[in-house]
Image (spheres, rainbow, N blue to C red):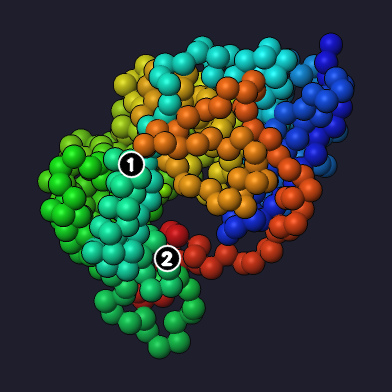
């Protein structure tokens, strides 16, 4: 029997995001697995969860008992679910799938049922200070072969989910923060989408992320207003706190709806899928606990005609993107992969990072997740631990708001 001999956790910040990487070392010399546990805003809490709580629980366990370890570890603290616990579980879980693949000499997508397709369709992000700058950036991506692009207007400070600034200045003495104006955002984003569709033509797929910045009636109005632009999907029109509104939104618009990056409790996605209130589920796979729960949810979604679009900006590490890719290749109901092109610096830390070509993300032929981790290089980029500014969101009158 091959057992878990050690669990090691690194936090590295080669770019803006703190990445949390887990290495499960086995009793077999040279055999290890890698997992993504990236909760970039609370990376040290995840590391403590792994080192102080999960490692003592898991040392000596059979590495092949992936499902049993996940089920056991998730309730071992009795109180369960939550971003810190789930990300830590994901680090272990993905590493165990990686180990299983290496032992079998097979890529993880083969262990999950085999390829349903050769590569995963991807979308990229384009933003800018003005509609014309956004369209220029979309054209640059189209020239690289991408046909699916998320478009966002950027506010002055480089913030991509606002757009349009604040129509009415805040009252005297208002607290500092990342201010946004939902009404101004609506007007500016409609102008952006109208401009983008007119300049880019019909054969380019546009996506947009509301980032939960609208009230329920505003979200309904917006989803109806953008029907004419035939979005591939509209992301997070509402926050998880307003899930009860989602079926009403879904019934009133033909715009495809995508949601899920903030979900951590199974009750958040169970009813959403069962009621067919979304068209794409897009949980952050490490945030939901790793490949084991994600494959269960993907199968559940498939039964309801709902596709996957797992959350995948740069705060999913290359290990996490590789895990997403393997699951996507084996999921009949895969929709699209959110892809950020990693820098050369990040690629050097993670040899084997998947490659995108002509709008598709390809796995490599290596067993397991097919990705490696340069521990020495990662240590050259220690976490900087700046306090997050963009999440200190406020409405025009100074009220604290969803970021
Ligand atoms: Mg999003």
Q: How many other residues sit within 10 Å of disc 1, few (<14), some (14-19) or many (≥20)?
A: many
Seen at 28% across and 59% down, the residue is 136
SS state under label 1 = loop
Tag 2 residue:
159
Seen at 22% across and 60% down, the residue is 192
Q: Earlier in the sequence, mark 1 or mark 2?
A: 1
Q: Which mark is residue 348?
A: none
Q: Residue furthest bottom?
A: 172
Q: Which mark is residue 146?
A: 1
Asked where in the image residue 385 lies, by quadrant, the reply is bottom right
SS state under label 2 = loop
Q: Residue furthest front?
A: 143
Rendering coords of residue 140 (x, y %):
32, 53
Instruction: Using the image as rendered, state which of residue 239 and residue 308 is in the foreground.
Output: 308
Compared with residue 105, is residue 358 higher up or lower down, i.e. above or below? below
**Would you say residue 58 is visible in this rendering?**
no
């Amino acid at each position: 029997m091959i057992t878990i001999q050690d669990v090691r956790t690194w936090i590295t910040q080669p770019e803006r995001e703190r990445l949390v990487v887990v290495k499960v070392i086995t009793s077999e010399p040279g055999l290890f697995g890698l997992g993504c546990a990236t909760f970039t805003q609370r990376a040290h809490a995840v590391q403590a969860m792994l080192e102080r709580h999960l490692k003592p629980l898991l040392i000596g366990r059979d590495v092949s008992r992936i499902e049993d370890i996940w089920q056991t570890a998730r309730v071992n603290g009795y109180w369960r679910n939550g971003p810190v616990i789930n990300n830590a579980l994901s680090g272990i879980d993905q590493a165990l799938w990686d180990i299983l693949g290496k032992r079998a000499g097979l890529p993880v997508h083969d262990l999950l049922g085999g390829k349903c397709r050769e590569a995963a369709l991807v979308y990229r992000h384009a933003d800018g200070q003005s509609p014309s700058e956004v369209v220029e950036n979309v054209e640059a991506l189209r020239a690289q072969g991408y046909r699916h692009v998320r478009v966002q207007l950027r506010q002055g400070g480089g913030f991509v989910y606002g757009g349009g600034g604040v129509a009415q200045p805040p009252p005297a003495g208002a607290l500092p923060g990342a201010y946004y104006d939902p009404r101004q955002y609506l007007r500016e984003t409609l102008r952006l989408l109208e401009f983008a569709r007119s300049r880019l033509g019909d054969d380019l797929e546009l996506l947009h992320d509301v980032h939960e910045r609208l009230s329920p009636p505003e979200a309904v109005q917006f989803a109806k207003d953008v029907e004419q632009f035939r979005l591939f999907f509209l992301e997070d029109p509402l926050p998880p706190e307003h899930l009860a509104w989602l079926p009403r939104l879904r019934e009133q618009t033909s715009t495809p709806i995508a949601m899920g990056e903030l979900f951590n409790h199974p009750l958040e996605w169970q009813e959403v899928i069962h009621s067919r209130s979304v068209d794409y589920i897009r949980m952050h796979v490490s945030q939901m606990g790793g490949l084991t729960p994600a494959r269960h949810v993907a199968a559940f979604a498939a039964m309801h005609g709902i596709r996957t679009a797992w959350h995948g900006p740069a705060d999913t590490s290359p290990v996490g993107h590789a895990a997403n890719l393997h699951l996507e290749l084996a999921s009949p109901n895969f929709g699209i992969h959110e892809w950020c092109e990693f820098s050369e610096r990040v690629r050097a830390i993670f040899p084997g990072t998947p490659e995108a070509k002509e709008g598709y993300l390809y796995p490599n032929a290596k067993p397991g997740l097919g990705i490696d981790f340069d521990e020495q290089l990662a240590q050259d980029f220690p976490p900087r631990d700046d306090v997050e500014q963009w999440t200190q969101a406020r409405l025009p009158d100074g009220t604290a708001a969803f970021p």
